[in-house]
Amino acid sequence: MTRHLRREIEKLKKKILHVGARVEESLQAAMKALSEFDEEMAQTVQDGDREIDALEVEVEEDCLKILALHQPVAIDLRFIVSVLKINNDLERIGDLATNIAERVQALVPESQRVPIPADIPEMARRSQAMVTRSLDALVEMDEAIAHEVCEADSAVDDLNRKMYRYAEEKIAADPKHTGPYIQILGISRYLERIADHATNIAEDVIYMVGGEITRHRM
């Protein structure tokens, strides 16, 4: 690898981690907005999505430029390809944080508020941890951490299924609050999708480090 290519790859790694950090901040803020029914914070999350979108485009352009100018091979090529995919997954997590913020705004009016079930913060904690650990796996090029992230996904799936049963029972018992319970169910679904994207990132790290495609087989 040339010295110039090494510098470009290091710059790219810093950029993708910056995208990851912004996405994590957005997700944390969305969940804080939910816990406090904070409409202003929810709006801030939505406004910040444009920055994440712009960062995604910048990283993609950098990847394509490196591919065109340096024609990397072996692990360097796998790194660039993986970053392209990880970049997309991070942008989607940012979108999902924005979707959660939109649901929060629907729950802000007193007439639309219902208690937030404990499983929602638990799903958020697990999903956020998966995102953080998937980025740790990327930084450390650590397959073991990536496999841990993949294994953690089933617990979030279980909680999401539990939320469907919860919403069904609550709507049957309290039909006038059907709308708010649907909003909570939507948040659960978004958190489950965030965990899926974190799993995608972890699978891309496994591919990057070992050249093994594990998607659909784990």
Image (cartoon, helix red, strand yellow):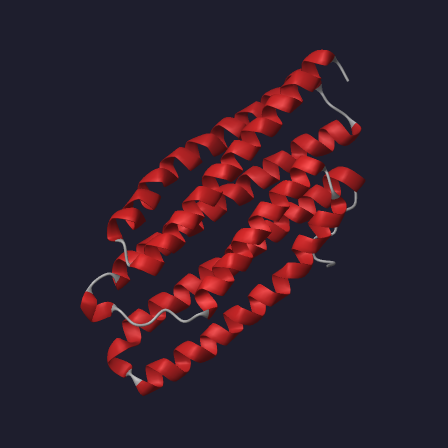
Specify whether 39 is left or right of 207.
left
86 or 20: nearer the eye?
20
Residue at 42% across, 31% down: 54
133 or 201: nearer the eye?
133
185 or 139: nearer the eye?
139
In the rendered image, the quadrant that contains the N terminus is: top right
Which of the 4 image quadrants contains residue 141? top right
Residue at 38% across, 51% down: 30
The residue most toward the top is 3
In the rendered image, the quadrant that contains the C terminus is: bottom right
Residue at 36% across, 81% down: 170
Residue at 43% across, 49% down: 28
Which of the 4 image quadrants contains residue 26? top left
Rendered position, 81 above or below 216: above
Residue 146 screen position, x and y as percent: 70, 48
Can residue 6 be seen at all in this image of the molecule? Answer: yes
Residue 67 screen position, x and y as percent: 66, 23
Residue 142 screen position, x and y as percent: 74, 42
Specify whether 51 is left or right of 155.
left
Residue 148 screen position, x and y as percent: 70, 54
Can residue 95 be seen at all in this image of the molecule? Answer: no
Mark count: 0
The residue most toward the bottom is 173
